[in-house]
Amino acid sequence: MKNSTFYITTPIYYVNDVPHIGHAYTTVAADVAARFYRMHLGAENVFFLTGTDEHGAKVALSAEKNNISPQEFTDQKSAAFQTTWDSMSISYNDFIRTTEKRHKKVVHEFLKTLKNAKTPQGNHALYEAEYEGLYCVGCEAYKFETDLVDGKCPDHGTEPELLKEMNWFFRLSDFTEILTEKINSGELVIRPESRANEILGLLKQGLQDVAISRRKVEWGVDLPFDTDQTVYVWIEALMNYISALGGPKGKLFSRFWPANCHLVGKDIVKFHAVIWPAMLMALDIPIPQQVFAHGFFTIDGSKMSKTRGNVIDPNELIDLYGTDATRYLLLSQFHFGADGDFSRDRLKNMYNAELANELGNLVNRTISMTDKYFSAVVPEYNVDYDKFFEFDLQTDWNRYDQHMQLFQFEQALEVIWGNVRRCNAYIDEQKPWELANTDRDVLADVMYNLLETLRHIAIMLYPFMPEKSVELLKQLGFDAGSEFSQPLDDLKLWSRLPLGQKLSKGAPLFPRIQLEDHA
Ligand code: MSP
């Protein structure tokens, strides 16, 4: 098990679409994980990759419809993804585009190696044969009759093309047993368990060989040993995870491969948990450690689609709520891994209830009271008072770490919000405004407990809301940069907030949004 470095990837997104919150959901989740591991392992030991999938019939068709060359089209669209990720504070280490030379070079190397490779049964991994069957351009995937509803692709509502052409095939069927073994032994972890069972079910039926090239698709990487063919877009797309590391001889490869986690939506698990590891085995390359598949969400109960006109642009949410709140709202709504529903109304209510009222108010009133009662200086506390804060926080850090490692983001947020709510209740119980007249010693303890818990909250929040976390630390009087350069184990200790530190009250972290302002 590779523990000292962490390599996480998102799918590379098709550029025929504009970035929407479906893409943002996976990308923000990967960013949260990357930031969490950077805190644990050090930034230099984490590699976070995202990018765009730019070849194939679907992209070429979209370019044609827009009357521009595929290259110009992909340049524009890929840039739109990068701009969106920048405005969402996505801290990717690299952004790979499949039209880049570095990618094509590795794809060529891999295909040449595959041409001579053998399967576990000793057969040639690749062979040429006639393919006769259906292909859905929208999915960029081969289809069986049983995949269709009334003869149409259920996802795209279109009739798939009938293909009859000579292609190169990968002998996936020879990998059924070895893949089953790897999944059962935990060498390849598929999460959540329901997805692992789905894949094991597929394996039980036996795998079929897959075509890895197309004859008439020009917008692609040509097959090095048969230039009449281009590599099937999915096959070369999967290779991005290694081409971005400079190929199997690259320095980054030796540091970061195998990937700790390919984070994907449930729609593309089979490609990542079956075809990709089988190809890697044929190439004699270690397989990824984990494929985590999150669920799909609907918008106000219906599938998000261009035809329904209900696609949400992440920039729309950022304009309304700001970057960090958007990140929070995306990940806090439902269990990561399960399907869920987004409703614009619920987003607003949650913003006001959880961010403006609960967290925002807590910060605001704690800092204002310290300002009023102790001239904005962290007061000296009396030891041993309210030990439970310290004790609970230690347990909470353990719970938080575990949830984060298992991609249980909403549960990690629950741990943070448990502290937010506890502090709000504590203020209501202790009534600092009364203590100010009756017992200044207890008042000092109460304010210290609140301020110090806010420091812990700020650190736990960092992966989710990096800017707000820094703002909160600043309000507590810290220089966030030097704070985050400390070992995390030190930051987790109780009473690191220096006595006498001067606070610096700032603007409200989450100004309330009037619901009627935004219909
Ligand atoms: N290009 C392929 C991936 C190749 S990876 C080697 C692809 N691209 S895609 O643009 O269609 O992106 C699919 C991914 O977008 C899903 O796996 C998921 O991560 C995300 N989502 C798209 N719509 C979504 C929802 N409605 N809900 C949640 N995630 C969604 O497939």
Image (tube, rainbow, N blue to C red):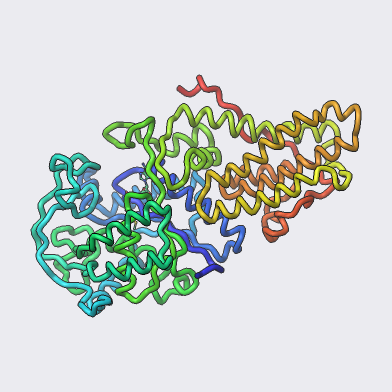
The image position of residue 205, as x and y in percent, is 23, 60
Q: Residue at x 19, y 48 (%)?
A: 147
**Relative vertical location of residue 428 with respect to residue 382 in this rendering, above or below:** above
**Relative vertical location of residue 517 with respect to residue 63 in this rendering, above or below:** above
Quarter of the figure with the C terminus: top left
- Left or right of 74, for residue 502: right
Residue located farthest toward the top when viewing the structure as drawn: 516
Number of numbered discs: 0
Q: Residue 206, can we see it?
A: yes
The image position of residue 64, as x and y in percent, is 20, 47
Q: Residue 101, can we see it?
A: no
**Relative vertical location of residue 260 with respect to residue 149 in this rendering, above or below:** below
The image position of residue 464, as x and y in percent, is 56, 46
The image position of residue 89, as x and y in percent, is 52, 47
Q: Residue at x 49, y 31 (%)?
A: 347
Q: Residue at x 45, y 60 (%)?
A: 261
- Foreground residue among 402 and 88: 402
- Left or right of 422, for residue 329: left
The quadrant in which residue 307 appears is top left
Q: Residue at x 55, y 51 (%)?
A: 403
**Relative vertical location of residue 94 with respect to residue 364 in this rendering, above or below:** below
The quadrant in which residue 142 appears is bottom left
